[in-house]
Image (cartoon, helix red, strand yellow):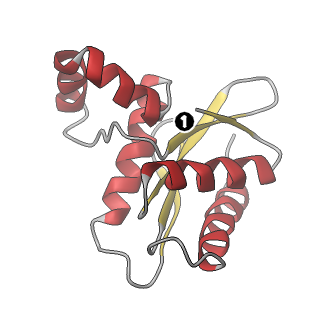
Amino acid sequence: MLDLKTANHIVNHIIDAASKRDDLKPMTAVVIDAGGAVISAQRQDGASPIRIDLAKGKAHGAVMMGISSRKLGERAEQQAYFIQAVNALCDGSLVPVAGGVLVRDSAGAIIGAVGVTGDTSDHDEELAIAAIEAQGLQADV
């Protein structure tokens, strides 16, 4: 189970790491549980208001499909109609670009996902991975 304390540590790690870098735009991070419910979220000063929804969409798509948002994006290139249909089933909340990373426990079970947005998708994903691994959990991209 992904608890509030761990989720807050993940979000804090992302925001703290981003604040120490001059090469990033204002970041937003969301942690959801395995059922898609938000546990923790933060938006840096200057991040646009829609960033919470974008970060949640990256995480939500990952946890609902059981693959990272990067892999969802790759699949969208191959099977656009399928991803469009899944997005419709998710009420348009799926964001198939890198930055949504699955969180797995030591047994390999999906216990949630982290969504990060604000800069390039590669930077978003990098921050998510580092924060998940800092908590002793497995980041699945």
Image position, residue 27 (x, y; %): 47, 69
Residue 31 seen anywhere in this rendered image of the structure: no
Q: Residue at x 40, y 51 (%)?
A: 56
- SS type, badge 1: loop
Callout count: 1
Q: Count neighbours of disc 1 (C-alpha within 10 A) and say few if under 14, some if 14 to 19, many if 20 or more.
A: many
Q: In the image, residue 70 lies at what x, y percent?
A: 45, 34
**Can residue 102 be seen by looking at this rendering?**
yes
Q: Position of residue 6 (x, y in %)?
A: 72, 56
88 up-or-down from 131: above or below: above
Q: Nearer the viewer, residue 28 or 17?
A: 17
Spot the residue most to the front.
23
Q: Quadrant of the C terminus?
A: top right
Q: At 34% from the left edge and 36% from the top edge, which residue is drawn? A: 96
User: Which of the pair 16/11 is nearer the observer?
Assistant: 16
Image point 67% across, 70% down: which residue? Answer: 17
| Image location (x, y in percent) of residue 124 | 51, 54
Q: Height in image: 100 above or below 130?
A: above
Q: Residue beneath label 1, please? A: 34
Res 14 quadrant in image: bottom right
Going by the image, does 34 lie left or right of 80?
A: right
Q: Say whether residue 47 is left or right of residue 21.
A: left
Give the answer, above or below, for where 26 lies relative to 122.
below
